[in-house]
Structures are given as C-alpha cells and as structure tokens.
Image (cartoon, rainbow, N blue to C red):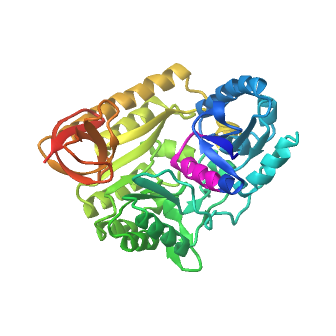
Amino acid sequence: MKKKVCLRTFGCQMNMADSEIMAALLKEEGYALCDSEAEADLVLLNTCAVRDNAVQKIRHQLDQLKGQKRARPGLMVGVTGCVPQYYRDELFAISDAVDFIAGPDSYRNLGSLVRRASEGERVADLEFRSAESYADIEPLRQEGISAFIPVMRGCNNMCAYCVVPFTRGRERSRPMSSVLLEASRLAEQGYREITLLGQNVNSYHDIEAAAGFPVLLDEVAKRVPGVRIRFTTSHPKDMSPRLVEAIASNTNICTTVHLPVQSGSSSMLARMKRGHSREEYLEKVGMIKQTLPGVTLSTDLISGFPGETAHEHEETLSLLREVRYDYAYTFCYSVRPGTSAAEQLEDDVPESEKKRRLQEIIDLQNGISRELFQADIGKVVEVLAESESRRSSLQLMGRTEGNRVVVFDRAGYRPGEIVKVRISSATSATLVGIPA
C-alpha cells in the first residue's frame, strides 16, 4: 500500500510551485498526496519567512502536529522552504515534532532525508546550490485552469528589509527552451492561464540563448497563443520599455502589472535600498500607462519602516492617489534578523503607529479600488471562469484580463470557459454581473 504525504503550503506563489515540484519528487519515492494530516504518513510544511507572522503560523502548526505524533508514533514531519533556511540553527530546537528540514535548493534530496529520518536521525539539508532551477522536473499539479511556471529563482537586490537573498540565494534562470517546453505541455493539457514566476521575474536572463525576460515573455506568448499569460513579481528597476512593448504586442499577455514600491518617499526608498526613487518609479508607471492603455496596476507597501516620519507616510498616501492602483498588498514592518535594516536601523516606529498608518493606507486604497471597480458597471468584460463561487453553486467566479475578480450567474457555463459578462455592481474587491 502506498504511503501518503500531506503537503501544507504557506506564503507566495513560488512556494505553491515548489510544493508541486516536491509532490512530483515524492511520487517517485512511492508517496501519494492526501489532504489530511490524520491519514498521512508524512506531513511536509512548505514555509515562508518573509514576515514574522508567517513564522508564527508554522510554530502553531508544529504544536498541533506534536499531539498527532504522540498519537501516531510513525508519523514523520518535515519543514521545507524558507523558514528552515532562515532559522537553520534554531528550527530543531523550536519543536521536537520536526524530523527533518530542507531548504529551497534541496528538494531533490527529499527521498534520502525521509529515509534517514525514518531511521531515527534528525537530518537537515540547507545547502545553497547555485545552479539549481528544477528545470527538468515536471511538477505534479492538480487538474485546474491556471498553472505556475517558475522561470528564475533567488534575488540579488538585497533590499534592507528582505530575507529572500538569505533564504533563496542568488539569482539563477531556467533555460528558455525548458520554459517553452513546459508552457507547450500545459497548453496541451488544457490549462487556460500560465503565470511566469520569479522573486524578481523581470531580471530573468538565459545566457546561452542571450535572452532576457522580454524575449522569454514574447516567446511564451507566441508558443501558446490560446493561453492567457501573466507574470510576477517585477522589480521597478528592471521594468524596461522592451518588456512593456512585449506585453502590448501579444494579445494573450494580460495587461496587468504587479510593481512593488514599498514606500512613496524617495528618502524611505533610499533607506530601504530599493535602487530607485519615487520620481524614477513614477516614470516607469507613466511609460506603462502610455504603452498599455487600460492597464491595471498593483503594488506592495510597508508601513512603519525604521525612521519613517509622518511626512514620509503622507508621501506614500499621495503616491496611492497619483498612481491609483487596483489593489495593494500592505504590511506593517517586522524586524527580520540578518537584514541590513535589523542590523543598522532602529525599529523606532511604535507598533500602534505602524498599525494606524497601515489602516490609513488600507482605507485610502479601498476607496480607490471601489472607484475603479464601479467605473466598470455597465461594461462588458471577458472573464476566464475559474471555479464555483464560494457563496453559491449557481454562480461562477473568474478574473478579467486585468485580474479583477468577477462573480456572475452560471447560466450553463463551466470553469475554463471565457465568458463575456455585463457588470451590474461592484465592491472594492469584486465585480458582479450576468453573462452578456
């Protein structure tokens, strides 16, 4: 009888893609996926260390698994991804529920780690492998509409607040031929949308093919013309005119760009070591909007970074008003040991003030999002249906090309179909309509 593995994924889309790689590797070791820890022989927690609250989720999960291990002594628990890479000297001490740990470059060794752990050894593989891109592994995906293709891994930017260079290592890119092959395979399998992933996706570079990200994006779009193409996450410094032109020249590349800024203040951006000013960022936004009329933009923002003044916070609010993002991922700053911010800057903004400023950002962004979404009322939009609505089986949920969520009457349509929907109402996060 096959052993079963339960994979729990925390964090970003790259972690979700990594879980699909781990599932494929464990299938070769004789494991079948299951959804419940209660029926699993092995539980893997694939983790994120970008923010402290993500780490606290793992601690809570391990506390729960400790009780399950007492009830079922044969149950094994592994922690993979960024948390073990970041807390390499502490994780075994954090919880005695952990049997083995593996960093993001060590997944090929999962089989060996599981076998050694089953023999009673607490074992770790946290080696950085600068050439590892998992390009030759076909991920084990659940059947669906959308799929991720990681095209590059790691980050060279060393932003002051960020642990990614310490947990994911230096940038390395997959061969373009490998990405194109996987995109073709996904199209043949019926996937309707592909998202190209990277911690800094637009710094992709295939040396042998002399191809940067604009070339890769263009080639993928032309290889699978019937599939929607998205990409994330971009760094503003690498957002080039050539990349924007590649989007404009391919009808199946979605005209939506996630462009993290973190702060609207040039002095803050300098302390964050972002590599660009407010003015340079706005120049990139202007270039994007001029070349891609109707483009939707999203961003990331941090409140309460060390030294943030009331004026710098106001500059972030003014940036929101000027750019008018569709949505923003917003966070309070949390100290990440080992980063230059933790070592060189005092975390001097009180927690209550961080939260107050964060709420101001959220309230302003919600108002902007509501205005943008309500402007779609009466329009007919194309929606890729993804699933049933959470509230009713009589409705479907999908997304526009601009990544706006739409809930609409089912009317005989099925997930995977492109549906023209007339928008009848809107909130700050969702459009509602009926098939046109």
Taking the view exactly as shown, the residue that stands out farthest to the right is 120
Q: Main SS of the magenta segment?
A: helix
Image position of 140 with respect to 431: above or below: below
Identify the residue at horizontal 57%, vertical 58% (top origin): 139
Q: Is residue 424 left or right of residue 130?
A: left
Along the line of sight, which residue is nearer the eye, 226 or 281?
226
Percent coordinates x, y for residue 262 in the rendering: 47, 43
- The number of numbered badges drawn on the structure is 0
Residue 154 appears anywhere in the view: yes
Image position of 83 with respect to 256: above or below: above
Percent coordinates x, y for residue 237 in the rendering: 47, 59
Percent coordinates x, y for residue 41 in the rendering: 71, 38
Along the line of sight, which residue is nearer the eye, 413 or 46?
413
Along the line of sight, which residue is nearer the eye, 209 or 75?
75
Percent coordinates x, y for residue 253 in the rendering: 34, 63
Image position of 54 with respect to 135: above or below: above
